Image: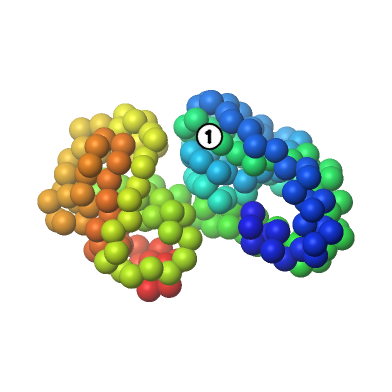
Amino acid sequence: MQRLLDALPADLRNDMLAIWEREKVPVGHILIEENAEAERIGFVLDGLLAMVKTLPDGRRHIIGLLTPADLFGRAFNGKSGYRIEALTDAELLTCPRTPFEELLTRSPEAERLFLLNVLDELDAAREWVMVLGSGKVVQRVASLLLILCRHKVQGAIAPRAPINLHIQLKRVDIAHLLGTSPESLSRSFKQLERDGIIAINTPYNMDVLDLCELTEAAGNALLIEDFGL
């Protein structure tokens, strides 16, 4: 959001700020239905949103995660290819789609940055496919933690600087998210802790101690590039 605002002239920046509202939604709240046009555009301030795709046989799959600083909602008359719903209680910054589109048409630079945010959303779906494609549960867990770290850091850091993560999901929900059992999930967390990669403070809070080792555990070297390492 700040990146978008910084690109605007002062008058457009004030107009943009005037249309945004803070909003809190409970877990399970549906923000955008699949194959529907978004009535509002928004940024995640706190919590997790899921991008959910319904298959022809009726099964529903999470194809991506949206975390703080991510944008959701498609502008310029595009229908969403997936449902956006809250995985946890979430705090959002939202605005009506039509005035947002009008402001973007007044600033080519802001429009370009908005499109970059859309590409970030597509990258989130790509990342999630990679997570679920990991054969071992510990690789899926490590990949999930890497995604959360990337959004927490928002920039380059020292590879062995601790990163504190507060994960609002219950372990049983994380297990469902990763396509495994709570028992296998617990063993994977303990393995990462034994290896000195994470330190578990509470079931909802942990420190990632070494991003390079976490990337190695995930078996996916592509994600580490997002930290500028």
**Residue 136 visible from this viewpoint:** no
Q: Residue furthest left?
A: 194
**Residue 15 visible from this viewpoint:** yes
Q: Is residue 82 left or right of residue 50?
A: right
Specify the amino acid type for callout 1: Ala
Residue 196 x %, y % = 16, 56
Q: Is residue 132 left or right of residue 137?
A: right
Residue at point 31% right, 37% down?
204
Q: Nearer the viewer, residue 127 or 163?
A: 163
Residue 118 x %, y % = 65, 55
Within the image, what quadrant is residue 73 found in? top right
Residue at point 76% right, 67% down?
109
Decide: is 215 above or below 176: below
Within the image, what quadrant is residue 123 found in? bottom right
Q: Nearer the viewer, residue 213 or 123?
A: 213
Q: Label 1 belongs to which residue?
A: 90
The number of numbered discs placed on residues in the rendered structure image is: 1
Residue 40 x %, y % = 73, 38
Residue 203 x %, y % = 26, 35
Residue at point 30% right, 32% down?
171
Crowding at dot 1, Cα within 10 Å, few <14 / some 14-19 / many 20+, comes out as many
Q: Is residue 184 left or right of residue 163?
A: left
Residue at point 25% right, 62% down?
210
Locate the C terminus by quadrant.
bottom left
